[in-house]
Amino acid sequence: MAKTEPKLDNRPGCILTMGEILVEILASEIGQSFRRAGTLIGPFASGAPAIFIDQVAKCGSPCAIIGCVGDDDFGALNVERLREDGVDVSGISVIKAATTGSAFVTYRKDGDRDFIYNITNSASGHLSVSEIREHLLKDCRHFHVMGSSLFSFRIIEAMKRVIETVKANGGTVSFDPNIRKEMLRIPEMREALDFILDYTDVFLPSGHEVMLLASASTEKAAIDELLGRGVREVVVKRGKDGCSYYDGKDERHVHALPVTEVDPTGAGDCFGGTYIACRAQGFTVERALEYAGAAGARAVTYRGPMEGTATLAELDAFIKERSEVSHG
């Protein structure tokens, strides 16, 4: 007897996310220090929720984002990019008295990155319950939470409001923790993360994040614990080692496609956006994982966090090309 896969809500309606929208400016050389003058590249449209939703749009799913930008060129750059790629931008507020968020990124010789952020004090810091657009909630069938967006208690309150509304309307929720360990030391933050996890249908951690929100001491036990508290699907992003899927009945592991990394920023967001869009469109888990893995792999071959987002047709071509390389 064939196993029945968990299903995301694929009724007509949109995929919605909420959070920071910013520009990213990159150091042009590996090992470049921000303590001295150097050449920078950018600005690029960015923000983890923005990258995620741009990828959802590229996959052909109706989608929208709630967020705030400043009344400046950086804000216009983001709004225009998202609109051009098919995202409903009616939930983006322009804050006249604030500037659009920014991130400056430099790449260390050991492969890690260092960031200088201006998010909390930017337009994104104005995001609150008052920015929620009721027409978007009415049409929402799936809501995606990005842990990086939980940087203020006003935003956490807004996230909770949207989550409760979407679930009450019969929709589903996905959660990419994307958090720093030190955030868990704040009692209110831990409570907020536990609240979100209690409503989560699809959990999308990177490998090292699997155990952050569980009390278990091994990855397998942590996954069992997460599934036991009501999460329906756990999809672990493992970078160059591929990805893994668990739903309590089925377990799948998918190898990564061979690529040369140029810029890893945004790869996990592209993976998540593709997986959620494909599942919402009724794709099998296996096919959704294949496309998601390809989206993450393709994203790292482009410089700039949102420059590697891709349509399903582009992902088909990329999968074919990479498969030929690995077998050639």
Image (cartoon, rainbow, N blue to C red):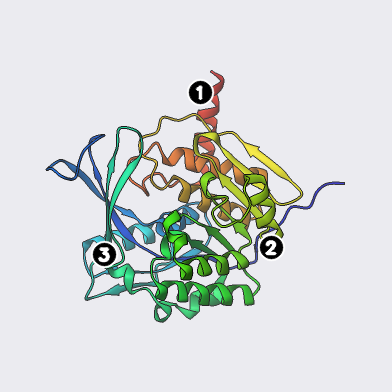
Please report whichever mark, 1 or 3, sits nearer to the chain's N-terminal start: 3
Q: Identify the residue at the far right of this view.
A: 1
For disc 1, the marked residue is 325
Q: Amino acid at mark 2?
A: Gly
The quadrant holding residue 125 is bottom left
Q: Secondary structure at mark 1?
A: helix
Which residue has dot 3 on it? 100
Locate residue 86 relative to residue 68 in the image: left or right: right
The alpha-carbon separation of the residues under discs 1 and 2 comes to: 41 Å
Q: Residue at x 62, y 69 (%)?
A: 171
Pinpoint residue 129: horizontal percent, then vertical percent. Answer: 43, 79
Q: Is residue 86 visible?
A: no
Q: Which residue is mark 2?
A: 230
Q: Residues within 10 Å of mark 1 (few under 14, many from 20)?
A: few
Q: Assign a secondary structure to mark 3.
A: loop
Q: Find residue 156 and report its image quarter.
A: bottom left
Rounded to the nearest angstrom, the CA distance separating label 3 from label 2 is 37 Å
Graded by Cα atoms within 10 Å as few (under 14), some (14 to 19) or many (20 or more), the crowding at tag 3 reads many
Q: Position of residue 170 (x, y in %)?
A: 66, 72
Q: Earlier in the sequence, mark 3 or mark 2?
A: 3
Tell us which disc is closer to us: 1 or 2. Answer: 2
Q: Nearer the viewer, residue 7 or 37?
A: 37
